[in-house]
Amino acid sequence: MRKLKVGIIGSGNIGTDLMMKLIDHDFLELTTMIGIDPESDGLKRARQLGLEVIENGIEGFIDRKEIADLLFDATSAKAHIVHAKILSDLEKRVIDLTPAALGPFVVPSVNIGAHIREGNVNLITCGGQATIPVVHAIGKVAKVNYAEIVATISSKSAGPGTRSNIDEFTETTARGLEEIGGAKKGKAIIILNPAEPPIMMRDTIYCVLENESFNPEEIKDSIHLMVKSVRNYVPGYRLRMEPMIEGNTVIVHLEVEGAGDYLPSYSGNLDIMTAAAVKVAEEIAQYDLAKTV
């Protein structure tokens, strides 16, 4: 079967976990890992796996552009602004795992079909990937006037990229709650918890509905269906308890356990991003294949 050739920009934790998920994939052929630190664990592992390693960043890819048709950008929001222009000029498609928010927001379980032909799609944030599906599920049953999410992650699973993108996280996630989740107003908060042993990613979703003229069971059923849909590509995604509904407010508690492909299981915040990225790329590859059949 013909596979879509893909490459990863960024050899940090997210890029390396993504690499482990893509090895021996049915629809995606990982050909290269692009970084700027020759001694990074990501580039070392890429060499061991027989991938083509580029050590001088995006500039090195320009001269070898034929090795990948789709790139995953696992760097930073600021870096992606530069990468996006270069990759667009090279006519390469990009799945952006940073909060740069240049391309349309995509959550696989909600709206991948609407953006499958886009040249650059954005995966928002880990908090967005975890919570937007639930807000969208609630919005299918009742009008959401306000959605507030609190994403709590282990301090150990927040690397330099995450820490330098805190402002972008809150702004981009809030936008995603509105634009994809369907909330009239969105707000996002992130907490880095230093507890030992490290906690898994936990998300609290607080929605205020327009009124109380809805069926609580329909809301719960919609949430459960969405959780099942997300679990198809993020197995560690689950409800911590039954959704709570009081008056016109809905509160949902989630937990995300990582798959442990490269990172510890408590790093669900990183795992949900890489799992979503692979799911989007799978859909793109299968769409391309269907066009050629």
Image (tube, rainbow, N blue to C red):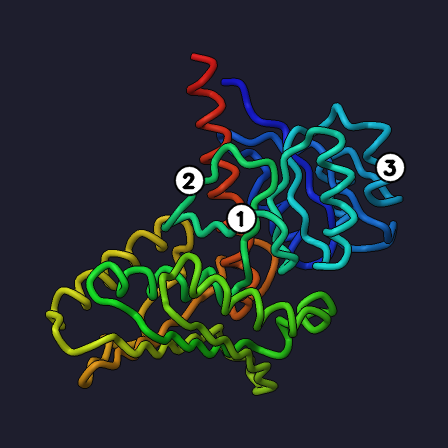
The quadrant of the picture occupied by the C terminus is top left
Q: Gap between marks 3 and 1, in whole Å?
A: 27 Å
In front of the other: 54 or 218:
218
The residue sitting at 73% across, 46% down in the picture is 9
Helix, strand or loop status at disc 3:
helix
Amino acid at the residue labelled 2: Ala
Residue 85 in picture, x, y percent from top left: 75, 41
Q: Which residue is mark 3?
A: 60
Residue depicted at 50% across the width and 69% down the height = 174
Residue 204 lies, in percent from the top left, at 39, 78
Sequence-wise first label, 2 or 1: 1
Callout 3 amino acid:
Gly
Residue at image coords 43%, 75%: 203
Question: Residue 114, labelled with which disc?
Answer: 2
> Residue 104, labelled with which disc?
1
Q: Pointer 2: residues within 10 angstroms few (<14), some, or many (20+)?
A: few
Q: Is residue 50 visible?
A: no
Local secondary structure at mark 2: helix
Give the mark nearest the N terminus, 3 or 1: 3
The kind of residue on which mark 1 rests is: Pro
Indicate the position of residue 104 as horizontal and vertical percent values: 53, 48
Q: Nearer the viewer, residue 92 or 68?
A: 92
Q: Residues within 10 Å of mark 3 (few under 14, many from 20)?
A: some
> Within 10 angstroms of label 1, few (less than 14), some, or many (20 or more) residues?
some
